[in-house]
Image (spheres, grey):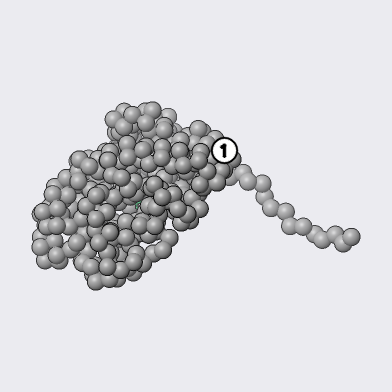
Amino acid sequence: MSTQATRTYTDLNPSPRLLLGPGPSMVHPRVLRAMATPPVGHLDPDFLVIMNEIQELLRMVFETTNQLTIPISGTGSAGMEAALCNFIEPGDPILICVNGYFGERMVDMAGRYGAKVHRIDAEWGDVFSASQVEEALRSSKAKIVAIVHAETSTGALQPLEEIAEVAHKHGALLLVDAVTSLGGLPVAVDRVGIDICYSGSQKCLSCPPGLAPITVSPRAEEALRARRSPVANWYLDLTMVQKYWGAERSYHHTAPINMNYALREALRLVAEEGLEARFERHRRNARMLWEGLEELGLTLHVPESRRLPTLTTVRVPDGVDEAAVRRRLLEEYNIEIAGGLGALKGKIWRIGLMGHSSRPENVLTLLGALKWIL
Ligand SMILES: *Cc1c(COP(=O)(O)O)cnc(C)c1O
């Protein structure tokens, strides 16, 4: 018998980080335990019950009665891609509001599906008014208005009610990125009048990354059925995925079984806490963070009136090495926060208090470490 030198690999033992960045957020132990449950088949009667419960729980957190409410297999960007590819046909005019990194990503994706992209831009940290959107709708005749609710790259919270009104007045569908808001602040799909809304599992829902909840209004479903051409993305084609999640239960792709276990448990935690109490917890801990940062002499990037409770952006003081502070937080304190993206690179830190990460003891730990470093 010949012996061959075998390469050994390190044991799986990543550092016990406190995740206070833009996602992933901390995961509740119950969600981790759910993930370790042995998988069953994707058409097992037990799994079908779990699928139904996930859809019911997703409607609860989206605050919607939309029939078509499911988790897309993939991260938040897959949700974004599904939201765009299902409702765009080549040449369709779409209006995209860009005030940060994720609006920019929507422009990139929509262009790849052949949309005629009209964009309006705002400063990174600003939000859009309904009149800006209406003016752009008049000239573009867009069929879809796409906008980010919680811009994770800037920390700005976009009000949606009036924009929903003008979109509908001009016959357009409202498409909303709720990746950093769902489960952390009200999204209220039906009350606001959002037609297409997607999120990600690893931000305010505090589940590991891997699923992207999406919900589609009856009006948008009608638009989907009225398409003249097939959806350009096979994997994310909702007309086919829907048949697996709906009554037909026909195979499309194998659902990531254990991720769905995890999402169901994460959503059950949301239901047990209650939406209102959960939103209040996010607001309370964010206020504590903001006060503490200001006491350290730091300046917050976004005015309080449009500041996200789930993601805070802090200006890096003059003369301070942005990346060195983050490195010390990670190496000496096991705390992860993030730096700026795009136009804000090197200028801000981004601190997430999402889902299970939004706890007073985490705020105090971060403030204490920052005080020591600065
Ligand atoms: C994180 C994020 C995404 C992308 O999600 P991934 O899970 O990284 O693919 C999209 N939009 C916003 C606003 C986000 O914060």
Against 219, is 205 above or below? above
Query: Identity of the amino acid at label 1?
Result: Thr
Residue at image location 28% in from the left, 59% down from the top: 225
- Mark 1, secondary structure of its residue: loop
Q: Residue 39: image x %, image y %? A: 57, 43
- How crowded pointer 1 is (Cα within 10 Å; few <14, some 14-19, many 20+) is rated as few
Against 4, is 39 above or below? above
Does residue 236 show up? yes
Displayed quadrant of residue 281: top left
Q: Nearer the viewer, residue 151 or 260?
A: 260
Q: Residue 345: image x %, image y %? A: 35, 57
Q: Would residue 279 appear left or right of 219 to someone viewing this image? A: right
Residue at image location 20% in from the left, 46% down from the top: 193
Q: Residue 38: image x %, image y %? A: 59, 40
Q: Would residue 95 appear left or right of 208 to someone viewing this image? A: left
Q: Is mark 1 within 8 Å of ligand 1?
A: no
Residue on which the image places disc 1: 37
Q: Quadrant of the C terminus?
A: top left
Give the tally of numbered discs: 1
Residue furthest out toward the right: 1
Q: Residue 123: image x %, image y %? A: 22, 57
Residue furthest out toward the front: 248
Q: Nearer the viewer, residue 153 or 290?
A: 153
Residue at image location 30% in from the left, 68% down from the top: 229
Does residue 329 show up? no
Residue at image location 41% in from the left, 32% down from the top: 269
Q: Would residue 172 appear left or right of 82 to someone viewing this image? A: left
Q: Quadrant of the N terminus?
A: bottom right
